[in-house]
Amino acid sequence: MDDLKKIRSNIAAIDKQMADLFQKRMKESKKVAYYKKEKGLPVLDLKREAELIQKNMDLITDEETKDYYVEFFKSILKVSKDYQNKIIDGVKVAYCGEKGAYAYLAAREVCQTPNLVPCSSFSSAYKKVENGEVDLCVLPIENSYAGDVGEVMDLIFNGSLYINRIIELDINHALLVNKGVKLEDVKTVMSHPQALAQCDEYISSKGFQRREYVNTALACKELKEKGYKDVGVIANRANGEIYSLDVLADNINTSRNNTTRFGLFSRSPRQVDPSSKMGENFIIVFTVSNSSGSLAKVLDIIGVHNFNMRNLRSRPSKELIWNYYFFIEIEGNINSDEGRQMIGELSSFCDKFKVVGSYSLLK
């Protein structure tokens, strides 16, 4: 046992040296990125990469580990290229849907970058961040009408990403049509089923026929491409500018209290000053043993450390039938002394425990 502790201590010391050297290497890589940006040179240089791999492979005298070093060095080169691309091209943010979808609007607002990458599903956007293809993704967590977004909740529990920011986006629907179309010309409206339901009173009052569509932005795209003169789309008014459509009516949803909460996901957690006390929140997910009082024990630990829960939710586990995992948003600073103590106790008690991240709320 003592020998293993000694070995692990040696590895930890080596890891620290590697971390220091990694930071130094990335600083030099950053200088290369600025040079390439100034000169208009591409990040990818296959000839240079091959030379570097061969040169560094020759430095390894241990034949047993040489092949592993080649893979290790290739991963360093990939990280370096990703970093240079980020510096040259800017932050890339994935979202689910098409340009003009509410997820697109949330990503545009929170990230303020032109490099928004549309994806066909929540999981594909999430995996693009995990794989390093993009830097961030913006995904819906819950809607004040429809409730939790189950697929995203499962990604939060099973995946490796962190939520570093929450944005609340008010959902306001408008009636959009092609240029020159008047209200009396419209016979049918198409949109996502939720949007149609949320505008039921307006649609009924006008006598429109309903046509369901997979999402609002795609409906706008078809409307523009097909040039319909008797069809309108229910979507956010921002789509009018994006797809060159006219807005015939705005704020047509029955209730004005319709909000979707989006999470900004990244590969690393947000760093919070332990002394910060204003507007901090954090999220944990966990499982506990299926026995009397287990969940109550978790809630007691949170209460003893004087943290206030914003909400508590449960989702069925995909691993065991009739078992559940729990999702809690908590007000306070996770990096404070009380926060660290609480996390230590919860980690020891829960069967599976994960800090999803900390965030400040934007609205």
Image (cartoon, rainbow, N blue to C red):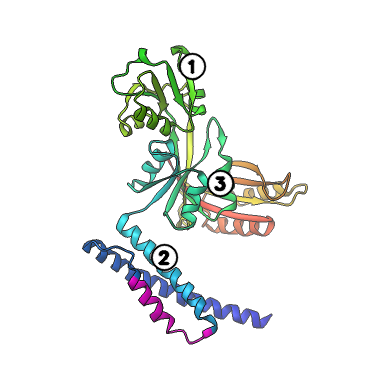
Q: Is residue 124 left or right of residue 175?
A: right
Label 3, on which residue? Answer: 330
Q: Residue at x 67, y 82 (%)?
A: 2
- Give the alpha-carbon distance from disc 2 to disc 1, as whole Å: 53 Å
**Tag 1: Cα neighbours inside 10 Å, few (<14), some, or many (≥20)?**
some
What span is in magenta? 47-63
Tell me the amino acid under the disc marked 3. Ile
Q: Position of residue 127 (x, y in %)?
A: 50, 52
SS of the residue under disc 3: strand
Tag 2 and tag 1, C-beta contact below 8 Å: no
- Earlier sequence position, callout 2 versus callout 1: 2
Label 2, on which residue? Answer: 79
Q: Position of residue 3 (x, y in %)?
A: 65, 83
Tell me the amino acid under the disc marked 1. Glu
Q: Position of residue 180 (x, y in %)?
A: 28, 19
Q: Is residue 266 visible?
A: no
As displayed, is residue 250 above or below residue 23?
Answer: above
Quarter of the image holding residue 38? bottom left
Q: Residue at x 45, y 68 (%)?
A: 75
User: In front of the other: label 2 or label 1?
Assistant: 2
Label 1, on which residue? Answer: 201
User: Overall secondary structure of the magenta stretch?
Assistant: helix
Which residue occupies the extreme front position in the image? Answer: 226
- Quadrant containing the C terminus is top left
SS of the residue under disc 1: helix
- Earlier sequence position, callout 1 versus callout 3: 1
Q: Is residue 306 left or right of residue 69?
A: right
